[in-house]
Image (spheres, helix red, strand yellow):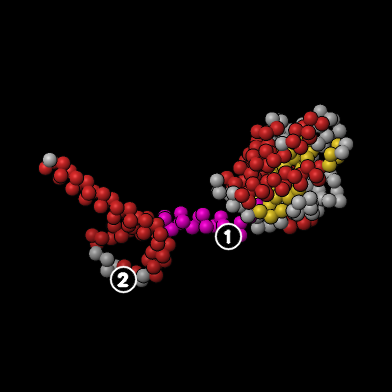
């Protein structure tokens, strides 16, 4: 019995110690920035008074506080003036590509709206080139790129050859990985083929020449071919699922996953 009592006491002591250490680190995490600020304004003469046997510990403590302060600052950076721009290609006066009754500008507005919905639901700030059926022209869309973390414009491809299908995202080389991830997100739903380099088309190699939206730092997604009857029908019926899948990529990119 005595043994167990001792053991219990030891355990109590340990848990008290663990509690104290946790509280200490919790306080350090909370006040790391303030601590580093205070530490920085203490004059060196005063720091020299710290006894030699303590200096090592103080050095460690300052190091840990600095790392914590830096780690804490990062998530805050995301929230300062950061937003995602999602725009629909073409406009209310320019239908873009047409296949019978299907208009590109109608398709892309549905996907833009759904994408904006899913992003906002995840707490991402979103700017769009219109709400509802509104689809502002390219000049307005381009103005929304500046200051955005990522800007994505939705389009539908078209070809004279009715059999042409596939997904591509056009971007500057720095956004290659993101472009490929966006194309793959669409592929998850439509099952269509990835065009270009695994779904990525280099702006400089785009058949349409230099696209103003991409030159300004945005990405252009061609969800599929409106000229292909099967693909356009599939995209029409799965627009919300496609948008949801793309939103996952952008939410992760924003660090909000
Ligand atoms: Zn287009």
Neighbourhood count class around disc 1 (C-alpha, 10 Å): few under 14, some 14–19, many 20 upward: few
In the image, is the residue at mark 1 within 8 Å of ligand 1 by its beta carbon?
Answer: no
| Residue 73 lies in the magenta-colored region | yes
- The residue where tag 1 is placed is 80
Residue visible at 32% across and 71% down in the picture: 45
Q: Position of residue 8 (x, y in %)?
A: 19, 45
Residue visible at 61% across and 56% down in the picture: 82
User: Of residues 3 and 119, which is closer to you in this image?
Assistant: 3
Question: Which quarter of the rendering shows the N terminus?
Answer: top left
- The residue where tag 2 is placed is 46
In this rendering, the answer to whether 246 lies above or below 73 is above
Position of residue 63 in the picture relative to residue 194 (left or right): left
**Quadrant hosting residue 20:** bottom left
| Residue 219 lies in the magenta-colored region | no
Residue visible at 43% across and 58% down in the picture: 69
Which stretch appears magenta?
A: 65-84
């Amino acid at each position: 019995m005595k043994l167990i009592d001792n053991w219990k006491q030891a355990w109590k002591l340990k848990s008290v110690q663990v509690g104290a250490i946790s509280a200490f680190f919790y306080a350090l995490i909370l006040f790391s920035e303030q601590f580093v600020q205070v530490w920085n304004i203490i004059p060196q003469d005063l720091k020299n008074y710290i006894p030699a046997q303590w200096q090592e510990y103080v050095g460690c403590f300052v190091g840990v506080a600095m790392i914590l302060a830096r780690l804490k600052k990062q998530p805050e950076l995301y929230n300062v003036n950061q937003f995602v721009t999602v725009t629909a290609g073409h406009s209310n006066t320019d239908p873009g590509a047409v296949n019978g009754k299907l208009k590109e500008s109608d398709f892309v507005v549905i996907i833009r709206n759904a994408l904006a919905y899913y992003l906002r639901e995840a707490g991402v700030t979103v700017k769009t080139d219109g709400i509802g059926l509104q689809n502002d022209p390219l000049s307005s869309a381009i103005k929304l790129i500046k200051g955005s973390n990522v800007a994505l414009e939705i389009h539908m491809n078209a070809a004279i050859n009715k059999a042409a299908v596939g997904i591509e995202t056009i971007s500057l080389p720095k956004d290659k990985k993101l472009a490929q991830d966006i194309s793959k997100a669409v592929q998850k739903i439509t099952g269509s083929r990835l065009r270009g380099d695994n779904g990525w088309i280099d702006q400089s190699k785009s058949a349409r020449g230099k696209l103003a939206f991409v030159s300004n730092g945005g990405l252009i997604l061609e969800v599929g071919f409106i000229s292909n009857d099967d693909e356009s029908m599939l995209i029409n019926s799965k627009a919300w699922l496609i948008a949801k899948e793309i939103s996952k990529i952008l939410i992760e990119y924003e660090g909000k996953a």
